[in-house]
Amino acid sequence: MKHRYYALTKGQQRLFLFKLTGLLLGFNLLIGMVLLVSGLAFLSLFIFALSLSVFAPFVDVPSGVKNGSLVYYSPLLIAEKIKHNAITLHSGSLFDYYFSLDFTQSAQARKKQVFQAYVDGLLTLINQYEHQPPDHIQINATSYILNPRTARKLGLQITKTNLIQQFILYFNFINLTCALSLLKGQLTLPKMNQIYSFNGQLSTLIANKPYLLKLKEKLKETHLKQTNAA
Protein backbone atom coordinates (compact mmCIF):
# COMPACT_ATOMS: atom_id res chain seq x y z
CA MET A 1 0.00 0.00 0.00
CA LYS A 2 1.25 3.46 -0.92
CA HIS A 3 0.09 6.91 0.16
CA ARG A 4 -0.56 8.65 -3.15
CA TYR A 5 -0.61 12.18 -1.70
CA TYR A 6 3.09 12.13 -0.80
CA ALA A 7 3.91 10.92 -4.32
CA LEU A 8 2.48 14.18 -5.70
CA THR A 9 4.75 17.11 -6.45
CA LYS A 10 4.47 20.18 -4.21
CA GLY A 11 2.61 21.95 -7.01
CA GLN A 12 0.12 19.08 -7.35
CA GLN A 13 -0.41 19.04 -3.58
CA ARG A 14 -1.14 22.78 -3.57
CA LEU A 15 -3.50 22.43 -6.53
CA PHE A 16 -5.43 19.64 -4.78
CA LEU A 17 -5.73 21.73 -1.61
CA PHE A 18 -6.85 24.76 -3.67
CA LYS A 19 -9.60 22.70 -5.35
CA LEU A 20 -10.68 21.22 -2.01
CA THR A 21 -10.84 24.68 -0.44
CA GLY A 22 -12.96 25.89 -3.35
CA LEU A 23 -15.29 22.92 -2.89
CA LEU A 24 -15.59 23.65 0.85
CA LEU A 25 -16.39 27.33 0.29
CA GLY A 26 -18.76 26.60 -2.60
CA PHE A 27 -20.65 23.99 -0.59
CA ASN A 28 -21.04 26.30 2.42
CA LEU A 29 -22.06 29.22 0.26
CA LEU A 30 -24.77 27.15 -1.43
CA ILE A 31 -26.04 25.67 1.86
CA GLY A 32 -25.89 29.11 3.48
CA MET A 33 -28.08 30.62 0.75
CA VAL A 34 -30.60 27.79 1.06
CA LEU A 35 -30.73 28.19 4.84
CA LEU A 36 -31.06 31.96 4.53
CA VAL A 37 -34.03 31.65 2.19
CA SER A 38 -35.54 29.03 4.52
CA GLY A 39 -35.16 31.29 7.55
CA LEU A 40 -32.62 28.93 9.11
CA ALA A 41 -29.50 31.05 8.67
CA PHE A 42 -28.49 30.34 12.29
CA LEU A 43 -27.64 26.78 11.22
CA SER A 44 -24.96 28.01 8.81
CA LEU A 45 -22.22 28.06 11.45
CA PHE A 46 -23.11 24.53 12.53
CA ILE A 47 -22.96 23.23 8.95
CA PHE A 48 -19.67 25.08 8.41
CA ALA A 49 -18.17 23.49 11.54
CA LEU A 50 -19.20 20.00 10.36
CA SER A 51 -17.85 20.52 6.86
CA LEU A 52 -14.64 21.92 8.33
CA SER A 53 -14.20 18.72 10.36
CA VAL A 54 -14.21 16.80 7.07
CA PHE A 55 -11.80 19.24 5.43
CA ALA A 56 -9.43 19.54 8.42
CA PRO A 57 -7.44 16.26 8.11
CA PHE A 58 -6.47 17.16 4.54
CA VAL A 59 -4.57 20.11 6.05
CA ASP A 60 -3.76 19.00 9.59
CA VAL A 61 -2.15 15.65 8.76
CA PRO A 62 0.31 16.84 6.07
CA SER A 63 1.12 19.89 8.22
CA GLY A 64 1.74 17.67 11.25
CA VAL A 65 4.05 15.43 9.23
CA LYS A 66 5.92 18.47 7.90
CA ASN A 67 6.53 19.99 11.35
CA GLY A 68 7.36 16.64 12.96
CA SER A 69 4.39 16.40 15.33
CA LEU A 70 3.01 13.39 13.42
CA VAL A 71 4.83 10.30 12.17
CA TYR A 72 3.58 7.64 9.76
CA TYR A 73 4.32 4.03 10.69
CA SER A 74 2.24 2.87 7.73
CA PRO A 75 -0.10 4.74 5.36
CA LEU A 76 -2.97 4.05 7.77
CA LEU A 77 -1.26 4.20 11.17
CA ILE A 78 -0.07 7.55 12.50
CA ALA A 79 1.55 8.45 15.80
CA GLU A 80 1.86 11.73 17.62
CA LYS A 81 5.35 12.78 18.62
CA ILE A 82 6.28 11.04 21.87
CA LYS A 83 5.13 13.19 24.80
CA HIS A 84 5.33 12.56 28.56
CA ASN A 85 6.77 9.11 27.84
CA ALA A 86 3.70 8.11 25.82
CA ILE A 87 3.05 7.40 22.15
CA THR A 88 -0.48 8.08 20.94
CA LEU A 89 -1.50 6.09 17.86
CA HIS A 90 -4.27 6.99 15.43
CA SER A 91 -5.94 4.97 12.70
CA GLY A 92 -5.72 6.61 9.30
CA SER A 93 -7.89 9.69 8.79
CA LEU A 94 -10.30 10.37 5.95
CA PHE A 95 -7.36 12.04 4.19
CA ASP A 96 -5.31 8.82 4.42
CA TYR A 97 -8.22 6.62 3.32
CA TYR A 98 -8.81 8.82 0.28
CA PHE A 99 -5.20 8.66 -0.84
CA SER A 100 -4.30 5.10 0.22
CA LEU A 101 -7.20 2.75 -0.44
CA ASP A 102 -7.53 0.89 -3.73
CA PHE A 103 -11.07 1.66 -4.87
CA THR A 104 -10.89 -0.93 -7.65
CA GLN A 105 -10.99 -3.63 -4.96
CA SER A 106 -14.06 -4.98 -3.20
CA ALA A 107 -15.11 -3.58 0.16
CA GLN A 108 -14.00 -6.82 1.84
CA ALA A 109 -10.56 -6.55 0.24
CA ARG A 110 -10.25 -2.93 1.35
CA LYS A 111 -11.08 -3.86 4.96
CA LYS A 112 -8.30 -6.44 4.92
CA GLN A 113 -6.02 -3.85 3.35
CA VAL A 114 -6.70 -1.48 6.25
CA PHE A 115 -6.05 -4.15 8.87
CA GLN A 116 -2.86 -5.17 7.05
CA ALA A 117 -1.68 -1.55 7.15
CA TYR A 118 -2.39 -1.42 10.90
CA VAL A 119 -0.34 -4.58 11.50
CA ASP A 120 2.49 -3.31 9.30
CA GLY A 121 2.49 -0.01 11.19
CA LEU A 122 2.75 -1.72 14.57
CA LEU A 123 5.66 -3.82 13.29
CA THR A 124 7.41 -0.69 12.02
CA LEU A 125 6.94 0.90 15.45
CA ILE A 126 8.38 -2.20 17.13
CA ASN A 127 11.35 -2.28 14.75
CA GLN A 128 12.13 1.32 15.67
CA TYR A 129 12.29 0.69 19.40
CA GLU A 130 13.14 -3.00 19.93
CA HIS A 131 16.92 -2.47 19.87
CA GLN A 132 16.86 0.33 22.43
CA PRO A 133 15.45 0.31 25.98
CA PRO A 134 11.75 1.39 25.78
CA ASP A 135 12.14 3.06 29.21
CA HIS A 136 8.50 2.49 30.27
CA ILE A 137 6.99 4.14 27.22
CA GLN A 138 3.22 3.83 27.19
CA ILE A 139 1.13 3.18 24.09
CA ASN A 140 -2.26 4.91 23.81
CA ALA A 141 -4.63 4.23 20.93
CA THR A 142 -8.22 4.85 19.91
CA SER A 143 -9.33 2.69 17.01
CA TYR A 144 -12.28 1.18 15.16
CA ILE A 145 -9.87 -1.19 13.36
CA LEU A 146 -8.33 -3.01 16.31
CA ASN A 147 -10.80 -5.19 18.22
CA PRO A 148 -10.46 -6.00 21.95
CA ARG A 149 -9.51 -9.65 21.35
CA THR A 150 -6.56 -8.79 19.09
CA ALA A 151 -5.55 -5.91 21.36
CA ARG A 152 -5.33 -8.20 24.38
CA LYS A 153 -3.04 -10.56 22.46
CA LEU A 154 -0.77 -7.57 21.86
CA GLY A 155 -0.72 -6.73 25.56
CA LEU A 156 -3.05 -3.74 25.25
CA GLN A 157 -5.92 -3.17 27.65
CA ILE A 158 -9.26 -1.50 26.98
CA THR A 159 -9.59 1.81 28.80
CA LYS A 160 -12.60 4.03 29.28
CA THR A 161 -12.74 6.81 26.71
CA ASN A 162 -12.50 10.10 28.58
CA LEU A 163 -14.83 13.05 28.04
CA ILE A 164 -12.40 14.92 25.78
CA GLN A 165 -11.90 11.84 23.57
CA GLN A 166 -15.67 11.30 23.44
CA PHE A 167 -16.26 14.91 22.40
CA ILE A 168 -13.64 14.64 19.64
CA LEU A 169 -15.12 11.37 18.40
CA TYR A 170 -18.67 12.71 18.24
CA PHE A 171 -17.53 16.00 16.69
CA ASN A 172 -15.82 13.92 13.98
CA PHE A 173 -18.91 11.76 13.41
CA ILE A 174 -19.33 13.06 9.83
CA ASN A 175 -15.61 12.59 9.20
CA LEU A 176 -15.79 8.99 10.44
CA THR A 177 -18.92 8.41 8.35
CA CYS A 178 -17.10 9.57 5.21
CA ALA A 179 -14.07 7.38 5.99
CA LEU A 180 -16.15 4.26 6.64
CA SER A 181 -18.29 4.94 3.57
CA LEU A 182 -15.13 5.09 1.44
CA LEU A 183 -13.94 1.87 3.02
CA LYS A 184 -17.19 -0.06 2.49
CA GLY A 185 -18.27 1.55 -0.77
CA GLN A 186 -21.65 2.63 0.59
CA LEU A 187 -23.04 5.03 3.18
CA THR A 188 -21.98 3.62 6.54
CA LEU A 189 -22.63 5.24 9.91
CA PRO A 190 -19.97 4.52 12.55
CA LYS A 191 -21.07 2.51 15.57
CA MET A 192 -19.60 4.69 18.29
CA ASN A 193 -19.80 1.90 20.87
CA GLN A 194 -17.39 -0.13 18.73
CA ILE A 195 -14.63 2.47 18.83
CA TYR A 196 -12.26 1.43 21.58
CA SER A 197 -9.47 3.10 23.53
CA PHE A 198 -6.45 1.01 24.49
CA ASN A 199 -3.24 1.44 26.40
CA GLY A 200 -0.27 -0.68 27.36
CA GLN A 201 3.49 -0.72 27.64
CA LEU A 202 5.65 -0.52 24.51
CA SER A 203 7.89 -3.24 25.99
CA THR A 204 4.87 -5.60 26.11
CA LEU A 205 4.00 -4.79 22.51
CA ILE A 206 7.59 -5.55 21.49
CA ALA A 207 7.43 -8.88 23.35
CA ASN A 208 4.38 -9.78 21.25
CA LYS A 209 6.13 -9.16 17.93
CA PRO A 210 5.97 -12.91 17.02
CA TYR A 211 2.16 -12.78 17.18
CA LEU A 212 2.12 -9.79 14.81
CA LEU A 213 4.48 -11.54 12.41
CA LYS A 214 2.22 -14.61 12.36
CA LEU A 215 -0.79 -12.38 11.80
CA LYS A 216 0.97 -10.63 8.92
CA GLU A 217 1.87 -13.95 7.33
CA LYS A 218 -1.72 -15.19 7.71
CA LEU A 219 -3.05 -12.05 6.02
CA LYS A 220 -0.52 -12.48 3.22
CA GLU A 221 -1.54 -16.11 2.66
CA THR A 222 -5.23 -15.15 2.59
CA HIS A 223 -4.50 -12.44 0.02
CA LEU A 224 -2.57 -14.88 -2.19
CA LYS A 225 -5.39 -17.43 -2.08
CA GLN A 226 -7.94 -14.82 -3.06
CA THR A 227 -5.70 -13.55 -5.86
CA ASN A 228 -5.17 -17.07 -7.24
CA ALA A 229 -8.91 -17.81 -6.98
CA ALA A 230 -9.68 -14.68 -8.98
Image (cartoon, helix red, strand yellow):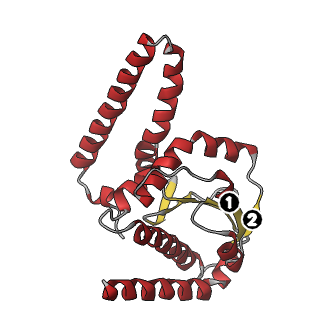
Q: Which quarter of the rendered picture does the C terminus lie within?
A: bottom left
Furthest residue in direction right, as rendered: 160
Q: Which residue is mark 1?
A: 196
Q: Residues within 10 Å of mark 1 (few under 14, many from 20)?
A: many
Q: Nearer the viewer, residue 135 or 34?
A: 34
Which amino acid lies under the numbered mark 1 shown in the image of this protein? Answer: Tyr
Image x and y of residue 20, in percent: 32, 38
Q: How many marks?
A: 2
Quadrant housing residue 213: bottom right
Residue type at mark 2 is Ile
> Which residue is the site of mark 2?
158
Residue 92: x %, y % from top left: 49, 58
Q: Residue at x 55, y 89 (%)?
A: 214
The part of the image, by quadrant, that contains residue 21 is top left
Residue 76 visible from this viewpoint: yes
97 or 222: which is nearer to us?
Answer: 222
Q: Are marks 1 and 2 in contact (CB under 8 Å)?
A: yes
In percent of width and height, residue 148 lies at 69, 70
The mark that comes first in sequence, 1 or 2, is: 2
Q: Which quadrant would residue 89 be assigned to in this image?
A: bottom right
Residue 54 numbered tag: none
* Most foreground residue, 219 or 138: 219
Up-down relation of residue 22 to residue 203 (above or below):
above
Decide if residue 133 is in sight here.
Answer: no
Going 67% across and 84% down the picture, which residue do you hit?
207
Q: Nearer the viewer, residue 210 or 171?
A: 171
